[in-house]
Each structure stands twice: as structure tokens, then as C-alpha cells.
Image (cartoon, grey):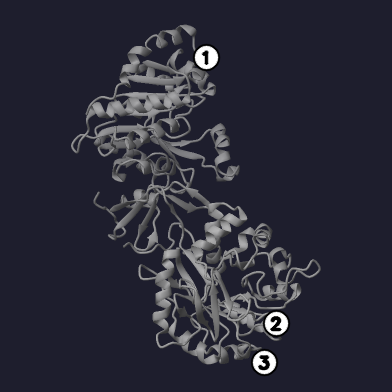
């Protein structure tokens, strides 16, 4: 049927015979898209007297909002923490590849690195929308170097830093710029951290707690100052203790401000977290769970030795270790694998599993009005 | 009047949908001759709409050359409010079939001049050539559309204040908050529906039984406005057994005896 629209002449695509994730439920509804946005068909019908230009038969498949990966260090041989001669090309390659896993937006993550790496990479990687050519970049996730020595994990010790210049000055000196930065992971027990947390929050940058030996009250204070995320829960932090649950206690803390929520990243690859621990976290605080891949350079590559930041790692099957040790160095599971494993291990519904990778990260980043959902007005990839 | 008595709600929906389907097919609409259909909202026609959608999906009917005129709409609630009759028609019929928006007509409860809106609706019906088949329901107080007891049997499309009972009954759709329930509606008049070439009324459930009795076994009375259709040359009442509970056994037996004739109106599917 030819179109007849008073608002716009752009072609309208109607996806039929599908199940869409909307209002936390999978529903048998058609999905309408025009000019890269989800369209309200009722408005189109009554206000514009318009209808679809083309119909796509989805043959009963599910349409879910694109996944958002807020912690991914690289993949397919690319390491975001390396200042290569073609940083943009590297990001673009990963961005294109992760579309196959259902990821349509991500935060290229940099592990603890020397200042020159940050200065180079942060000027090259810009926030931009995604499309057929690759997932969109929402900003970078800077995981370090303001983290705890005891919980450095695979991060190189010699580049760890503290807020010795008072806080923000340390950040500017280390990172060079905060433009195009969407998230910073830091250890809140470091002196002067409150000022940093408050300042970053005010600038709209998500503050995440991780690689830390903070106790619960230190963590709660940081949340009150603006921190809203926990980097890979359980990993690189003090274990849960019944008299001081540490950062893990944030999941059920009563000190979190009323109008806010603490989200937490989970690497649901079956390796970084025992399924029982995953279930405990999920049951304690289901709406805050955010699936992350924490994928490293080797994701998508065959077994062997590869570089991550300033270190060498080794792939053995689905495990990635710091070469010569048994310290986990990151994951090589893809986001769709994580969604499936999470659903299977937690016994949650399909809707919950999908939302943990789409709606929740969008809510965390404060962009859920146009990402992570299929609500009218939300972003939709342009038509092929 | 033809009184079609079926076993239950589902059968009523199916019979009514088949009747509409066959009527449209026999009419054989085209770009120069549209079939004009009057439509109701509410729980009663839902089953019928579901069946019509099924027939459309099977390819037995197309709404490409059908124009529709709805009976009523609330005044003052947003067009996309989940309880508006626009939303009802979109979700329960229009979005599932091949009808064009410009061929659907629903009164606009947010029009700047409500009287003009009602008059213009009557003009649009006239311009379309009048209604071929007006489908409606019946309220427990015997009203058709929002023509509540006491409405003139000669009334036309106009603004009506809703009865207190109606407002209370509707509260459950507005979070139980009486202040949110619309108090006025735009409705076609009794005479507007009487002008249609044919009228089909659907009645299901025991709570409608007394109204049905008043409508067809007692006299024409403005307190039971559906009784006006006793004076229409082509009316079909389709009901389930529960709705006949207040009728005389004689009436029921008479019309049940006619079912083998009346069923020919719905089966088989007429060829195009």
C-alpha cells in the first residue's frame, strides 16, 4: 500500500508475525519503525492516516532491544587499552563483530594503563550512534587506575594510582580528558574519593565501585555521593561476610537514597561466578542485575597467547588466565552466551534475561527513554 | 425482527461475524461502492471482532472498501487513553485488518466545538450514502449507544451526560478514581441508528435479559430505547440463552423453530 503521511515521507517498516519485548513481557505485537525510531502505529493511523510501506515477516521470532555491553575490553585481536596506530579502526572492528551477538551499544573499556595510553585512546574514541556498520559507542569505561592494590586482579601493579593531588587533578593528569567517558570504576576506600565520586556524578559520568577492599559503610557512602554501579560483582572485592557484607551488601542496603538504585555487573559466563552465587545475587536484587561480558582481546579468537593492556594472557578452552598463573584475566564469552547462561543458571524468564542485557544497562546509564527498550520513540537501527 | 438464539457468548460472536462477513461479500464493495458499517464498543462485540479478524486472516473478507462509523466516544479523555473508544477500536479491530484510517469515523471527544462535531458526524454519514448495517449492543437499562432511559426516540448525534450508574460502573477502568471517569460522551441518536438500512443488536448474559424482554415483548418506550427498533423494517437480534431468561417460552420456541432458515444467512460462505 502506498504511504499517505502528513508528518514525514520517510518509509515505514512494519515487522509482523513476531513477539516483542515490551512492558516487561513478550507480546504478540507488530513493531513499526520509521527513520531510526520505534513508531506508535495508533498515532500513525489516527493522526496521520498512514500505514506501512514494507512488511517484514519475522516468522515467530522474538524482537528484543539491542544489548548494551558496559564492560568490554576488546575482542577479535583488538585491545582497547593499546594505543595502536589505528585506535578508531580497532573499535570499529569490534563494534561490527559484536552486532552478531546482539550488542548494539557498548562502552569500550580500558583497564589500568599509563597516562599516555589514556591520552591517546580517549582523544580517538568518540561517542557515536550505531547502525549497520557496527554497534554504537556510548562512551568509554575507565576501569582503573584508581583501584586497590590488593584487588588489582589482572591489572598491572605499576600503573595503579591514588588521589594524591586531591582528586579531580589526579583524574585530569591521568586521563587527560573526561570527554567521551561514560563510566569510571574506582575503589572508594582511597582517600579523597568522595570528591571524585561527586564531581564525576555531577558531570553525568557513572561511577562504579570495583577492584576494592571497601567495607559496606565505605561503599554506602560512595553510593550516597553518587556511585550507582558495582563492577563485576563478587570479583575483585572482599567476599560477603555476615558481619560486614562489603560491597556485595549494597544489593540489599537500606542506605541507598530513595530515588536511586544500585546496579551491579555480572559476568554470567559460568566461570567468573558460580551459578549459586549468581542466583543469590539475582534473587536478592533482580532489577539491578546488568549482564556484562568483560570480554578481552581474545574473544572471538582461537586458543593461545594474546595481549591485554600491558600483560600477556593465555586461553585455555573457555578460560582466559594471566599467562603463567591461575588468575582469571577476563572473559571470552559473548553477550548472547551470557544471556543464555544467565537464564539457564538462574531459572529466570526470557524477558528478565533479555532485560538484564538491555533495559537494565540503559537504566544504569540514564538513557532508557531511547535505548534498551522497544517503546515508542526509542532508537531503532536504520533499515537495511 | 429476526431473533437468533444461540447457546453462548462465543456462538453469538461467531454468528454475528459470519452475518457481517456474508453481508459484505454479497454486497461486493469496490472503489465506487463502499459498504458502510456502524460499529459498537464494549465487552459484547469483542467475540464478534475476534472472529472477523480470523475471517480476514483466512482471506474470506477484506475491509479495503468498507467504511465504518462508531456509535460513541467519551468526552475529554485523551485519544490514546487506554479506555478511549479510539484505543478500543484500534486494539480490537483496526490494527488487525486492512481497513484504511480515512475510512474509519469515530466521534472526537476532544473537538473544540462538540455540537459541531456531532452535526458534522451526521453529515459524514449522509455523504457516505447512509449506513448499510449498524451493529450495536444493549445496556442493562435497555439503552442503545449512550441513549440512556428517557432519550428521545427521534434523537440524533449529540452530547450526553452519563448516568450516575454508568460512571460508577466505569470507575474500575480508571483506577477506581471517580474524578478520572468521564462524565459526558458523544453518541449517535436513536434515530441515527434507525436510519440505517439494517440493524443488528447483540445481547449476551443474564444481566441483559430483562432489557431484552422490555425491548421486544413490551411496547415502544423511550425508557427502553432499544424498543424503537420494533419499528425498523430490518432488525436482527442475536442473543445467547442466558439473555432469553425473561422472555416468554412461546417467543423463544417460535424463533428457535426458525433457526434452520436463519442459519442460511451465515452458512455457507457466499462466493465472491
Residue B234 percent coordinates (x, y):
32, 19
Q: Residues within 10 Å of mark 1 (few under 14, many from 20)?
A: some
The Cα–Cα distance between marks 1 and 2, rounded to whole angstroms, is 84 Å
Residue displayed at 34% across by 26% down: B18
Mark 2 or mark 3: whose residue is earlier in sequence = 2
Residue sticking out furthest to the top: B250
**What secondary structure is found at the residue carrying circle 3?**
loop
The Cα–Cα distance between marks 2 and 3, rounded to whole angstroms, is 18 Å
Q: Chain of mark 2?
A: A
Residue displayed at 74% across by 64% down: A254
Residue carrying label 2: A150
Q: Nearer the viewer, residue A206 or B81?
A: A206
**What secondary structure is found at the residue carrying circle 2?**
loop
Q: Which quadrant: the C terminus of chain B?
A: top left
Q: Are marks 1 and 2 in contact (CB under 8 Å)?
A: no
Q: Chain of mark 1?
A: B
Q: Which mark is residue A380?
A: none
Residue carrying label 1: B246
**What secondary structure is found at the residue carrying circle 1?**
loop
Closer mark to the observer between disc 2 and disc 3? 2
Q: Which quadrant: the N terminus of chain B?
A: top left
* The quarter of the displayed image where residue A142 is located: bottom right
Amino acid at each position: 500500500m502506498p504511504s499517505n503521511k502528513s508528518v514525514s515521507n520517510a518509509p515505514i517498516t512494519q515487522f509482523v508475525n513476531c513477539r516483542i519485548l515490551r512492558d516487561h513481557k513478550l507480546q504478540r505485537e507488530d513493531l513499526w519503525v520509521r527513520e531510526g525510531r520505534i513508531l506508535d502505529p495508533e498515532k500513525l493511523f489516527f493522526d496521520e492516516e498512514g500505514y506501512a510501506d514494507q512488511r517484514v515477516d519475522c516468522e515467530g521470532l522474538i524482537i528484543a532491544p539491542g544489548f548494551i555491553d558496559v564492560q568490554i575490553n576488546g575482542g577479535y585481536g583488538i585491545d582497547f587499552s593499546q594505543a595502536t596506530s589505528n585506535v578508531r579502526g580497532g573499535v570499529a572492528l569490534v563494534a561490527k563483530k559484536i552486532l552478531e551477538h546482539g550488542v548494539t551499544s557498548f562502552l569500550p573499556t580500558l583497564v589500568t594503563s599509563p597516562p599516555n595510553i589514556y591520552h591517546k585512546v580517549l582523544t580517538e574514541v568518540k561517542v557515536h550512534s550505531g547502525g549497520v556498520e557496527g554497534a554504537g559507542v556510548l562512551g568509554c569505561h575507565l576501569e582503573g587506575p584508581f583501584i586497590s592494590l590488593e584487588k588489582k586482579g589482572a591489572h598491572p601493579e605499576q600503573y595503579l594510582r591514588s588521589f594524591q593531588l586531591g582528586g579531580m587533578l589526579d583524574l585530569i593528569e591521568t586521563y587527560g580528558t573526561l570527554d567521551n567517558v561514560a563510566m569510571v570504576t574506582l575503589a572508594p576506600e582511597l582517600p579523597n574519593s568522595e570528591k571524585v565520586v561527586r564531581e564525576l556524578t555531577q558531570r553525568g559520568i557513572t561511577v562504579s565501585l570495583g577492584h576494592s577492599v571497601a567495607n559496606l559503610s565505605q561503599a554506602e557512602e560512595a553510593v550516597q555521593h553518587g556511585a550507582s554501579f558495582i563492577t563485576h560483582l563478587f570479583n575483585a572485592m572482599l567476599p560477603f561476610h555476615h558481619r560486614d557484607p562489603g560491597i556485595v551488601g549494597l544489593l540489599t542496603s537500606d542506605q541507598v537514597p530513595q530515588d536511586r538504585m544500585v546496579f551491579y555487573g555480572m559476568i554470567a559466563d559460568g566461570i567468573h561466578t558460580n551459578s549459586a552465587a549468581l542466583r543469590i545475587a539475582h534473587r536478592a536484587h533482580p532489577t539491578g542485575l546488568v549482564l556484562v561480558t568483560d570480554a578481552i582481546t581474545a574473544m572471538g579468537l582461537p586458543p593461545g597467547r594474546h595481549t591485554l593492556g600491558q600483560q600477556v594472557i593465555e586461553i585455555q578452552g573457555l578460560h582466559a588466565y594471566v599467562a603463567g598463573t591461575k588468575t582469571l584475566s577476563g572473559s571470552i564469552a559473548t553477550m548472547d552466551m551470557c544471556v543464555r547462561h544467565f537464564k539457564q543458571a538462574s531459572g529466570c524468564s526470557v524477558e528478565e534475561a533479555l532485560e538484564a542485557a538491555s533495559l537494565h544497562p540503559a537504566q544504569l546509564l540514564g538513557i532508557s527513554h531511547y535505548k534498551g527498550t522497544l517503546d515508542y520513540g526509542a532508537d531503532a537501527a536504520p533499515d537495511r | 425482527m429476526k431473533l437468533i438464539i444461540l447457546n453462548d457468548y462465543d456462538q453469538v460472536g461467531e454468528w454475528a461475524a459470519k452475518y457481517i462477513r456474508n453481508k459484505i461479500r454479497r454486497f461486493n464493495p469496490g472503489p465506487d461502492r463502499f459498504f458502510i458499517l456502524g460499529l459498537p464498543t464494549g465487552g459484547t462485540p469483542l467475540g464478534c471482532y475476534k472472529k472477523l479478524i480470523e475471517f480476514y486472516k483466512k482471506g474470506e473478507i477484506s475491509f479495503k472498501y468498507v467504511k465504518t462509523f462508531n456509535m460513541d466516544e467519551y468526552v475529554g479523555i485523551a485519544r490514546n487513553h487506554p479506555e478511549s473508544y479510539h484505543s478500543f477500536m484500534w486494539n480490537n479491530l483496526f490494527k488487525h485488518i486492512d481497513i484504511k484510517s480515512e475510512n474509519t469515523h469515530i466521534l472526537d471527544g476532544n473537538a473544540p466545538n462538540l455540537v459541531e462535531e456531532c452535526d458534522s458526524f451526521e453529515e459524514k454519514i449522509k455523504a457516505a450514502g447512509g449506513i448499510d448495517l449498524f451493529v450495536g449492543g444493549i445496556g442493562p437499562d435497555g439503552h442503545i449507544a449512550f441513549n440512556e432511559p428517557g432519550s428521545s426516540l427521534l434523537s440524533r448525534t449529540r452530547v450526553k451526560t452519563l448516568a450516575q450508574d454508568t460512571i460508577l460502573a466505569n470507575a474500575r477502568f480508571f483506577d477506581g478514581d471517580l474524578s478520572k471517569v468521564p462524565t459526558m460522551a458523544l453518541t449517535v441518536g436513536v434515530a441515527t441508528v434507525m436510519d440505517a438500512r439494517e440493524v443488528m443488536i447483540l445481547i449476551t448474559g443474564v444481566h441483559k435479559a430483562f432489557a431484552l424482554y422490555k425491548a421486544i415483548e413490551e411496547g415502544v418506550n423511550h425508557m427502553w430505547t432499544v424498543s424503537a427498533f420494533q419499528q425498523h423494517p430490518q432488525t436482527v437480534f442475536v442473543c445467547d440463552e442466558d439473555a432469553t431468561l425473561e422472555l416468554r417460552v412461546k417467543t423463544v420456541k417460535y424463533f428457535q423453530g426458525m433457526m434452520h432458515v436463519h442459519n442460511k444467512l451465515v452458512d455457507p460462505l457466499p462466493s465472491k
